[in-house]
Amino acid sequence: MSIIFIEESKTFHLYNDEISYIMNILPNGHIGQLYFGKKISPKKDYSWLLEMVPRSMASYVFENDRTLSLEHIKQEYGVYGSSDYRFPAVEILQENGSRISDFHYCSHRITPGKPELIGLPATYVEEEEEAETLTLILKDSVTGIELNLFYTLFSRRGIIARSARFSNEGPHPVHLLKAMSLCMDLPDSNYDWIQFSGAWSRERHPKMRHIEQGIQSIGSMRGNSSHEHNPFLILKRPSADEFQGEAIGFSLIYSGNFLAQAEVDTYDTTRVLMGIHPEWFDWKLDPNTFFQTPEAVMVYTDRGLNDLSQTFHRLYQKRLARGYWRDKARPILINNWEATYFDFTEKEILRLAETAAKSGIELFVLDDGWFGTRVSEHSGLGDWRPNADRLPYGIASLAKKIEQLGMKFGLWFEPEMVNKDSDLYRTHPDWLLSVPGRTQSHGRHQYVLDFSRGEVVDAIYRMMADILKCGHISYVKWDMNRSITECYSAALPADRQGEVFHRYILGVYRLYEQLNQTFPEILFESCASGGGRFDPGLLYYAPQGWTSDDTDAIERLKIQYGTSFCYPVSSMGAHVSASPNHQLGRSTPLATRADVACFGTSGYELDLNTLSSDELNSVHNHVTFMKTWRELLQFGTFYRLQSPFEGNTAAWMTVSDDRSQALVGWYRILNTVNPPYTRLKLYGLDPGRLYLVSIKDHFGQRELGRFFGDELMNAGIPTSDDNSGDAPKKERSDYDFQSRIYILQ
Ligand code: DGJ
């Protein structure tokens, strides 16, 4: 790994064994983008990549010179209005009304390791040798604003982390109206764009299209990163697939409003922008203050989408997630939400816990409804003390009783929200985000607290810490069940209202950080009505997240498959729930529900006391299976094999680091009569190693035989079905929605 500056050609070359990232200082002092892709040999000059060809109808920077038109130059952090007409990375409103800026290179620093981003989640290193950082220092001489562009090159894999910091060293305040984390011009537009989009209970479905001249974008203006679009984007060559070909992934480590955009211009170059959504963003930058953008991570591969995903998985598992739980296999939990919803007593909770403990489950999570007057969606949010009618002996006492059963205890919170029917609201009606004199829109009968205010965050921290400090709470589920409306803070002046969305997220991060610091061994799971804030920002504080409120196993195949393009299995909360499923009404076999949920941080979310003894036996077996295999399931190298979006079957697998073990999940959606012969080719195995392959399905577990890794990867495992049209004679009724786990040892 190396970052070099070649003085003669004013070129920066960042490279490791995988990638090269090359920039230079343009004749006008701006930064040009020369190359990002597979590693190329270090050399003195790559200026031929600039292509400064005189063109008609262009605007030029220098008088009597038709070479430098910013519109025609591939750049690093483009500005608008001084010969570039594409969407820019930055927009600064100045005292005289001008929005033109002109950032010139002043100097640079190359430092080992990676600096922290104060107040923001970011990737990190543990040893300085893991990365090297280039800081480009630019200045706009008219406003006096200094711009630092940070590039961290990781020593292994094709990873570059980027962010920008604006420091006002001038005499006047300015308004930052746009400050993207990443801007990069690619030399052509031969890319397919893949976004991960959907809705509540239908999150992160991959959607692909070829990019064309014009703008394609995704984003969120809801205050949370959203169910609708994830802050992640892939540009891949049309010929690339899961196993080969070029692709670049762009991921934003942020949980609020975001924009990810690709603009293909008239010459078929592509400008990628990623960062805080500029709509509704207006940050007043006073003299002697700075603004730090969130971090964006770019990953390049020429080995296909699985390789791209595996790079993100490793990075986010090991160098974004932090703390006590980062590397630990996660406890198998039971959550009472779909078992009881709001309707429970301590006695019923303990009855459920007893059965869970007997099944080998390790953690009991008490969900919504344990606090204040919360017996429905209408009241209690904000009053974080136990409901004395339901829990007459308090939380610590319940937690101890659950510990006596041999399980840990976890608790649900929704820290950012308040019901109007709550003591918190009655005492502090001005703590809502709301515009004076206007309607306050509610969502699920609740309102959003103004987390841009320090005293609000502090008050919630005190209430939560009071509960958590009893010492018997091992896990917290942090929920967030509505997006922001009427984004206005009573505590900020008129000219700072454009800061509220971002300050809100900074408040969320501060509360998470304080709780992480005070309670380092508590496992946090993020949630926002399921996957409404399943983003890298929260992974920094909570190493796992509730992937979706849709717990139907077949829907989950799609959601977990889509989520896996960026996020590791260790981050995906996945539970076995009741059948018929509560969201969809679909009935699926218990084994299939378990076989999908085990590719996640697995748990249960149903009333175990309604199951038959056979079913409880299956639960026990699944829990035992999970305990045996969870390190591999959660931390192995994950491969997508067959897409549930493309056919009647889906498959994925995980391989241990030493390639001695692997687990394959195979799922068939609908039964078919007299089906064709099929085989599943495996990946990532040791070609010369002999694997003992067993199959676990509805008939139980049995050995299939011994096969070499290269047999399994090149010839594949036969997955053909045996239904030749006599299915009803087999005395089973669960032919649809079948699954198998192949165990390779
Ligand atoms: C939404 C979450 O996604 C559910 O799991 C549950 O915690 C409810 N909120 C509780 O209100």
Image (cartoon, rainbow, N blue to C red):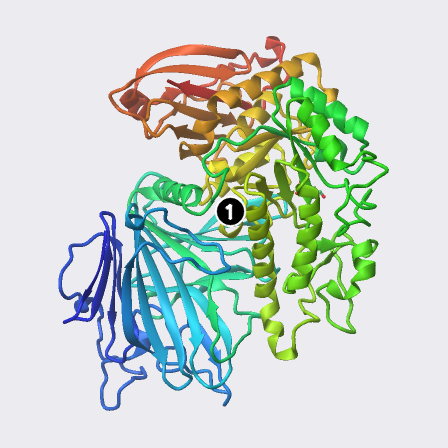
Secondary structure, mark 1, is: helix
In the rendered image, the residue lying farthest to the right is 389
Up the image or down, 428 lies above or below 519; here it is below
Up the image or down, 675 lies above or below 386; here it is above
Few, some or many C-alpha atoms within 10 Å of disc 1 (few <14, some 14-19, many ≥20)? many
User: Residue at the spot x=47%, y=45% of the render?
Assistant: 321
**Residue 371 screen position, x and y as percent:** 78, 43
User: Residue at the spot x=42%, y=68% of the render?
Assistant: 165
The residue labelled by disc 1 is 539
Is 379 on the left-hand or right-hand side of 310? Answer: right
Up the image or down, 104 lies above or below 399; here it is below
Judge by depth and name the residue closer to the eye, 442 or 380.
380
Visible in this render: residue 255?
A: yes
Visible in this render: residue 246?
A: no
In which quadrant of the rendered image does the C terminus lie?
A: top left
Judge by depth and name the residue closer to the eye, 106 or 706.
106
User: Residue at the spot x=69%, y=12% of the render?
Assistant: 613
Judge by depth and name the residue closer to the eye, 340 or 639.
340
Judge by depth and name the residue closer to the eye, 299 or 715.
299
Q: Amino acid at mark 1?
A: Leu
- Quadrant in the rendering for residue 699: top right
Is 550 on the left-hand or right-hand side of 517? Answer: right
**Residue 363 screen position, x and y as percent:** 62, 29
Is 6 on the left-hand or right-hand side of 197? Answer: left
**Residue 19 screen position, x and y as percent:** 25, 52
User: Residue at the spot x=41%, y=23% of the render?
Assistant: 678
- Quadrant in the rendering for residue 69: bottom left
**Residue 137 screen position, x and y as percent:** 33, 72
Is 512 on the left-hand or right-hand side of 612? Answer: left
Quarter for ligand 1? top right
